[in-house]
Amino acid sequence: NKIFIPAEDRLFVGDLDSETLEELEVPDDWAFDRESTFYITASDDGSRVFFSDGNIFFVTDESFNELYSANCLSSSRCSAEFRDGILYMLTDYFLILYDSDDGTLIKQIPVTLYGNGVLKMYFDENNHQLFIQTGDQISILDTETWIELTSIENVYCYHKETDRFFVF
């Protein structure tokens, strides 16, 4: 149970269980003036945490020790998700896959999406598809060939149970 708090030119993590506050080390060129582009997410087990200011990103372990960092290759926001030892990072028009342990680049896939908006990913294992939604756009990729099958704009969401898209 953690909460992350940007304040002036510092980033803090609050532990809700122990009610403690700790300052995190961030890269020297961290853009504190771009709070609207900050994105933070963690792996399901909490062993990896992703931080981005929209220009650069860094990944830490559960104790917030930096494991690796790199440029986001984005003009607005880069968002990410951890899954099965892979960091899936969405930037402007690319889905980039990294090994979540050491940051080794696995693959860079062109997509019609850009990193703006809250990232939602849904993996359809049976059909080998990855649904990625940012804001009002969803792209569907084939996870065997990593080809973008389609991109749907003006969409609220995808409803898995009925296999329907709700659009406006």
Image (tube, rainbow, N blue to C red):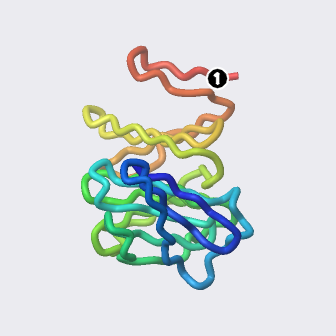
Residue at screen point 51% across, 71% down: 23
**Is 112 left or right of 50, judged from the image as shown?**
right
Which quadrant of the figure has residue 103?
Answer: bottom left
- In the picture, which quadrant includes the C terminus? top right
Residue at screen point 41% across, 69% down: 59
Q: Total number of numbered labels?
A: 1
Residue 80: percent from the left, percent from the top? 47, 55
Residue 126: percent from the left, percent from the top? 25, 32
Instruction: Say which amino acid is labelled 1.
Output: Val
Name the foreground residue: 90 vs 38: 38
Crowd band around label 1 with a 10 angstrom C-alpha radius: few (<14), some (14–19), many (20+): few
In the rendered image, the residue lying farthest to the top is: 162
The residue wearing badge 1 is 167
Circle 1 sits in a helix, a strand or a loop, which is it? strand
Name the foreground residue: 59 vs 20: 20
Name the foreground residue: 69 vs 164: 69
Residue at screen point 53% across, 65% down: 12
Residue 109: percent from the left, percent from the top? 46, 60
**Is 103 left or right of 3, judged from the image as shown?**
left
